[in-house]
Amino acid sequence: MEGQTLSVDITAPEGIPEKEYEPRHHVRKPESPLKIFGKNLRERRLHRKLTIKKFAKMLGVSVKTYMRIANGTGNPTYETLLRIAIALGISIHITPSSK
């Protein structure tokens, strides 16, 4: 996005005088691939009506390890990814990082 500018018009919510309104400036960072994967994993687990404990057991990992993966803070092993794919009947495509 180099060379591009972003213009945002922020107005005061109804009922607050414009001069008294100080908006909070939040720039949301893009979600990491692990966070996105974790969200999708959680949704699929819930769709299959599996508890965290039962799903972790199916994967052969501890509840704590599963929670780290689902929260996007854990980095699953290749073996765990294969178990996830088998347990959910999905395919997982791994793209190497460009770092």
Image (cartoon, helix red, strand yellow):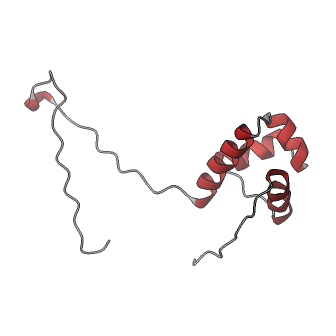
Is residue 96 positioned above or below 24 on the image?
below
Q: Tell me residue 25's x, y (percent).
A: 29, 44
Q: Tell me residue 50's x, y (percent).
A: 80, 36
Q: Nearer the viewer, residue 57 or 47?
A: 47
Q: Is residue 36 left or right of residue 85?
A: left
Q: Is residue 83 left or right of residue 68?
A: right
Q: Tell me residue 96's x, y (percent).
A: 65, 76
Residue 16 visible in the picture: yes
Is residue 54 positioned above or below 80 on the image?
above
Q: Tell me residue 14's x, y (percent).
A: 16, 25
Residue 91 lies in what quarter of the image? bottom right
Q: Nearer the viewer, residue 43 or 56?
A: 43
Which quadrant: the N terminus? Answer: bottom left
Q: Residue at x 59, y 60 (%)?
A: 33
Is residue 66 positioned above or below 84 on the image?
above
Is residue 27 positioned above or below 82 on the image?
above
Q: Residue at x 79, y 60 (%)?
A: 81
Q: How many marks?
A: 0
Q: Is residue 26 left or right of residue 38?
A: left
Q: Residue at x 13, y 28 (%)?
A: 20
Residue 10 lies in what quarter of the image? top left
Q: Is residue 35 left or right of residue 52?
A: left
Which quadrant: the C terminus? Answer: bottom right
Residue 72 visible in the picture: no
